[in-house]
């Protein structure tokens, strides 16, 4: 199981759709089956979107293990879960349906947890050193992992505030003294990985991860799909985080001045923006909200509802961004308790260099360039690698041979065939040919 | 010491869409050698700015990454108009980029000073009407 994604070996046809769609070139097809190179996978879910054979799936926990649990399981509600139904995205409307499928929602702490996260981010921006600007949100776990793998120089830009979905569960446990096990509603593979392979803390506060799509399916199967609930006048601030820009609005609401922020979503945009940040092109920006899924978490592959419908639902809600004096007093107390803080430093994930010593690595690099020069450079994927360059690297790392390339193989066979022909003519010189 | 590794890039004039690709390639290549992320980043910045100079001013050209055991060199060569006043060009914010390029967000006049800041050795050779050769060296150890 690699980062929230599972390969179903029996369904995999060994086509190249997934390896071509992977933005970090983390996939290979070996012996007709897709494989994920774990240290390169950022759990963005692009491969799931592009698999036509449904051979790639979310590595969520089985619904049965949660629904058959002898005690009630608590559920941490993701903003995108609120947008999956015909009614307005108000978390209160989910309480009944969730209890009906045997889960106890802990969404009650969410408004506080997300408020606290936004407050902590705004404080971090206000006190940040200008050389660490812009600060980058940690809310999207796929973006965090992308930075660990591809942009390690940007790690110091990550705002040291944990996801409110994570510390919100801590807050709920402190408040209620409940010992119940908690499942996290996950809108993408990266959220599943957040539970089973956390970054920034030793162990996740949640025990299980279950997809938003699965929860939506369970709820709909109980006839809730048709339920009509009147829209309340006001939407919750934290539900806005499901949509790109929601976090920025929330952070800005805690600041007494204009916040210079950029919010981008989608793999391509995130890659380009992070590269530009690394090159120093956005030093005057204070905050970057980057989401690997287009439109934000509502665009995650683990949702059931159309991301555009979700977007419309969230937009249709009126949100009050100011808080009462009592709320602020409570937030300040929680802020001082620092439960929002990342518990562990986020470390880079380094790729194994080509050689132990630089001189060795340089020799390998030369070898790699030589191998690459001989390849057809059409990146067809037939060798099971996403590109000729990836193929050349695999070969010098000892994970493949030049003949894995069908063009090289064809050349080799035609060469051998010619040789055979020559040989055959030489061997039968005692037989007189062509007597006609 | 072994032979240096050479990587060469063709840079086309006014090809803003491809700008940054060579920089990313330089960074990823240096990473596979096991160089520290700070060195990779500095080399990427130099490569990016040098590439942008070729795109905007040089009428395209060639960029070479040369890796030796103790240093990397990024060499950018063009057959462009040359730089009339080098000390002026080195100043932050000084730019001769035309308006349409500035409107795209490029040509802010930080290129050469940025390259120099990220280099351990920096050399520029320019002749009016003939072209410019830029050499930036970053020490590995």
Image (cartoon, grey):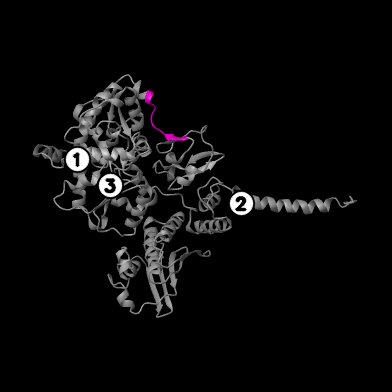
- Residue shown at 20% from the left, 52% from the top: A259
Q: State the extent of the magenta-drawn residues as a range.
A: A54-64
As drawn, is A96 to the left or to the right of A430?
Answer: left
- Residue shown at 51% from the left, 43% from the top: A16
As drawn, is A167 to the left or to the right of A406?
Answer: left
* First in sequence: mark 3 vs mark 1: 1
Q: Output the chain of dot 2.
A: A
Report the number of numbered marks.
3
**From this viewpoint, is residue B52 visible?**
yes
Is residue A55 part of the magenta span, yes or no?
yes
Q: Which mark is residue A407?
A: 2
Neighbour tally class for label 2: few under 14, some 14-19, many 20 plus, Cα within 10 Å: some
As drawn, is A62 to the left or to the right of A324?
Answer: right
Is residue A34 part of the magenta span, yes or no?
no
Q: Which residue is mark 3?
A: A137
SS of the residue under disc 3: loop
SS of the residue under disc 2: helix
Q: Output the chain of dot 3.
A: A
Q: CA distance from mark 1 to mark 2?
A: 58 Å
């Amino acid at each position: 199981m690699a980062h929230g994604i599972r390969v179903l070996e029996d369904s995999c046809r060994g086509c190249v759709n997934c390896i071509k769609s992977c933005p970090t070139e983390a996939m290979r097809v070996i012996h007709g089956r897709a494989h994920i190179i774990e240290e390169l996978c950022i759990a963005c879910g692009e491969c799931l979107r592009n698999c036509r054979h449904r051979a790639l799936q979310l590595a969520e926990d089985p619904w049965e293990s949660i629904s058959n649990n002898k005690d009630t399981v608590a559920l941490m509600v993701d903003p995108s879960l609120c947008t999956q139904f015909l009614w307005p995205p108000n978390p209160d409307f989910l309480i009944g349906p969730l209890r009906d499928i045997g889960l106890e929602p802990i969404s009650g702490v969410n408004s506080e947890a997300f408020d606290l996260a936004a407050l902590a981010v705004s404080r971090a921006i206000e006190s940040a050193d200008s050389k660490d600007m812009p600060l980058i949100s940690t809310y999207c776990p796929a973006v965090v992992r992308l930075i660990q793998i591809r942009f390690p120089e940007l790690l110091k830009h990550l705002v040291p505030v944990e996801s409110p979905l994570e510390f919100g569960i801590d807050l709920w446990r402190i408040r209620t003294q409940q010992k119940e096990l908690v499942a996290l509603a996950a809108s993408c593979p990266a959220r599943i990985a957040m539970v089973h392979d956390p970054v920034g803390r030793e162990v996740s506060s949640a025990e299980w991860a279950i997809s938003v799509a699965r929860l939506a399916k369970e709820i709909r199967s109980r006839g809730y799909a048709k339920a009509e609930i009147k829209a309340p006048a006001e939407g919750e601030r934290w539900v806005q985080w499901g949509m790109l820009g929601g976090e920025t609005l929330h952070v800005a609401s805690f600041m007494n001045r204009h916040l210079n922020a950029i919010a981008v979503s989608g793999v391509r945009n995130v890659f380009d923006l992070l590269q530009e940040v690394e090159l120093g092109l956005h030093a005057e920006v204070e905050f970057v909200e980057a989401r690997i899924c287009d439109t934000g978490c509502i665009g995650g592959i683990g949702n059931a509802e159309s991301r555009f419908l979700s977007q419309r639902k969230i937009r249709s809600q009126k949100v009050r961004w100011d808080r009462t004096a009592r709320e602020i007093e409570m937030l300040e107390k929680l802020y001082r308790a620092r439960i929002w803080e990342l518990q562990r430093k986020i470390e880079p994930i380094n790729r194994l260099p080509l050689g132990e010593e630089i001189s060795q690595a340089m020799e390998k690099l030369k070898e790699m360039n030589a191998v690459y020069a001989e390849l057809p450079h059409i990146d067809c994927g037939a060798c099971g690698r996403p590109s000729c360059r990836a193929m050349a690297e695999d070969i010098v790392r000892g994970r493949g041979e030049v003949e894995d390339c069908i063009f090289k193989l064809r050349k080799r066979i035609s060469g051998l065939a010619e040789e055979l022909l020559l040989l055959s003519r030489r061997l039968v010189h005692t037989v007189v040919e062509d007597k006609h | 010491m072994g032979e240096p590794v050479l990587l060469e890039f063709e840079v086309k004039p006014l090809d803003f869409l491809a700008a940054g690709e060579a920089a990313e390639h330089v960074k990823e290549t240096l990473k596979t050698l096991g160089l520290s992320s700070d060195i990779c980043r500095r080399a990427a910045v130099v490569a990016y700015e040098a590439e942008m100079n070729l795109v905007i001013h040089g009428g395209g050209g060639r960029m070479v990454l040369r890796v030796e055991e103790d240093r990397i060199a990024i060499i950018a060569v063009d057959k462009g108009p040359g730089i009339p006043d080098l000390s002026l060009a080195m100043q932050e914010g000084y730019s001769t980029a035309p308006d349409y390029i500035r409107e795209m967000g490029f040509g802010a006049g930080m290129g050469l000073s940025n390259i120099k800041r990220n280099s351990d050795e920096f050399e520029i050779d320019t002749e009016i009407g003939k072209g410019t050769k830029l050499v930036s060296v970053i020490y590995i150890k």
